[in-house]
Image (tube, helix red, strand yellow):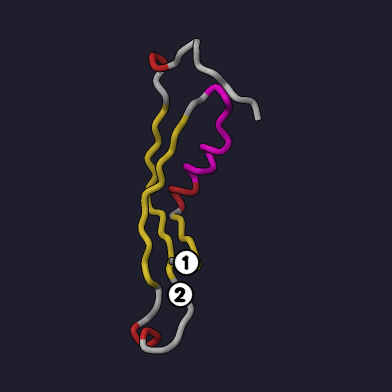
Amino acid sequence: MAVASVAVTSPVLEVCLSHALSNETEEIMGLLLGDVVDTRTQATKDKDYTESMQARIWAVSLHRREQAARSAQRVEISP
């Protein structure tokens, strides 16, 4: 299944941008929630078409790592 487009709501985009701009001392994991829908109209469903599936991202769930879960023995990999 090919996705032709992705729609992201404004609040989700704001959260993604703030996540991207966070610094290395903040450990954040994000989960995007959404669905995939067929954007064809009823009139075009009977004709030949290229797939027009759209991924819609409508929510985000952020999880910060707790201070107690941090370990001095954790190994970091530099890029």
Answer with the quarter of the image where residue 43 lies. bottom left
Residue at which label 1 appears: 2
Q: Residue at x 36, y 66 (%)?
A: 37
Q: Residue 10: image x %, image y %?
A: 46, 52
52 above or below 56? below
Q: Residue 62: image x %, image y %?
A: 40, 36
Q: Name the amino acid, label 2.
A: Glu
Q: Which residues are magenta?
A: 14-25
**Closest to the observer, 20 or 51:** 51
Q: Secondary structure at mark 2?
A: loop
Answer with the quarter of the image where residue 44 lies. bottom left
**Closest to the observer, 28 or 52:** 52
Q: Spatial distance from mark 1 to mark 2, Cα to Cα? A: 7 Å
Q: Residue 65: image x %, image y %?
A: 42, 24
Q: Residue at x 47, y 65 (%)?
A: 3
Residue at which label 2 appears: 51
Q: Are marks 1 and 2 in contact (CB under 8 Å)?
A: yes
